[in-house]
Amino acid sequence: MKRTVVLGGGEAGLIAAAYLERMSETDTVVVSERERHVFSFLLYRVMKGMPFDEATLDLWDAFSDRDVTVVRDHVQGLDTTEKRVDLRSGSIEYDTLLIALGGVTRLDAVDRSRVSDVRTDAREIQRAVHSGSVRDVVIVGGGPVGVETAATLGFLDVSLLTSGDHLLADFPERAGRIAERELGRRDVDVRTETRATKATENGVVLDGERVEHSDLTIWAGGVKPNPVIERFDLPRTKRGLLVDASLRCRGADDVYAVGDVVDYPDKVKDGYSAGLEARRAAKNALRELRGRRPKEYDERWHPSIVYLGRTTALFAADVIVHCGAGPAILRAIAARGYPFFWSYVY
């Protein structure tokens, strides 16, 4: 029996593993540093007060009745010639490898001690904003995560900073303008073309000069590829591993990569795209095992819904942009049902 190893227990890695588990051609092994996966789709609900455990998935429970082996360990290196992944506790061999190790914060060690990262510190942010000791909040990052965080914390004095000239840079410009307008209605201070250059004990330095007071500074900006890929014997750029149109790593036909660790033209870095990539990479891995050529990854339809507070959300897909109660209802239904959907569909 062939063995497919999936590196990473995030959304992309788990979607790939769940798809591979249904097929009889391969045994599937997932290597993850964490026991639980936090659904990024539910982060804003955690900050609203949702119990943290309800926004997470226990990896062992998720695959307890499935033919998937979960290994909790840290990836240390990769030898594609020997087809071996080096772990902290040993090594594991593979026939096919799927790398989904995700991204890490761009914050340095000093800033990291003074800034809460929304993707990893949602529970701590929840405690802080409901403690009564936080009034002024600065959020760095104008993407979907930053916008949803600002909308969620609108009951405080919130400033949302983005270095771009409008919010939601990967969306049509009109979507960013609508988001700015809706947040303004909720008294969120949106500042475009503003860069946070340093974090202090009680604020942030803007554009290297002025200090903005902050009781709580939240990082919702971009991420960089997991630095462990620098130890892999695979071609890469600063933005990630180089892959071809079928999501195979260049120079290694039996290695695929998806999510925040890959780089290719017009790459979109969000959870939805990572999930689509994971499905295609898993399907291509199986096609190769069956002696068939892999198919190119083609993301023609990329719908996104961004929560804007209260009963409003923004829907965007290609040139279609709609803001109102309809998208908010869809977003709420998706948020409530996603853990159930994951458990019973995947």
Image: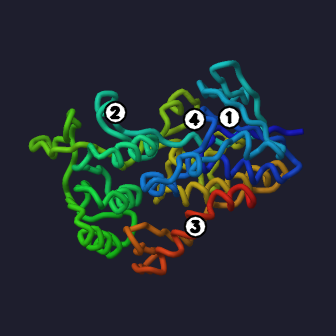
Q: Residue at x 82, y 48 (%)?
A: 289
User: Badge 2: few (under 14), some or many (20 or more) residues near its Cα, within 10 Å?
Assistant: some
Foreground: disc 4 or disc 2: 2
Q: Position of residue 80 (x, y in %)?
A: 67, 31
What residue does disc 1 label? 31
Distance between mark 1 and mark 3 Cα atoms: 28 Å
Instruction: Specify how the rendered protein is coloured.
Output: rainbow
| Left or right: 91 as drawn, with respect to 261 | right
Could you tell me how far apart the alpha carbons at marks 4 and 2 are, in whole angstroms? 29 Å
Mark 4 or mark 2, which has the lower sequence index? Answer: 2
Kindly identify which residue carries mark 2: 112
As drawn, the label of residue 234 is 4
How many residues crowd around disc 1 within 10 Å: few (fewer than 14), some, or many (20 or more)? Answer: many
Secondary structure state at the residue bearing disc 1: strand
Nearer the camera: disc 4 or disc 1: 1
- Return the mark for residue 334: 3
Question: Mark 3 to mark 2: distance in Å?
Answer: 31 Å
Residue displayed at 16% across by 41% down = 205
Amino acid type, callout 2: Arg
Front label number (1 vs 3) = 3
Could you say where residue 156 lies in the image, as x and y percent from the top left?
A: 26, 56
The disc, 3 or 2, on the residue closer to the chain's N-terminal end is 2
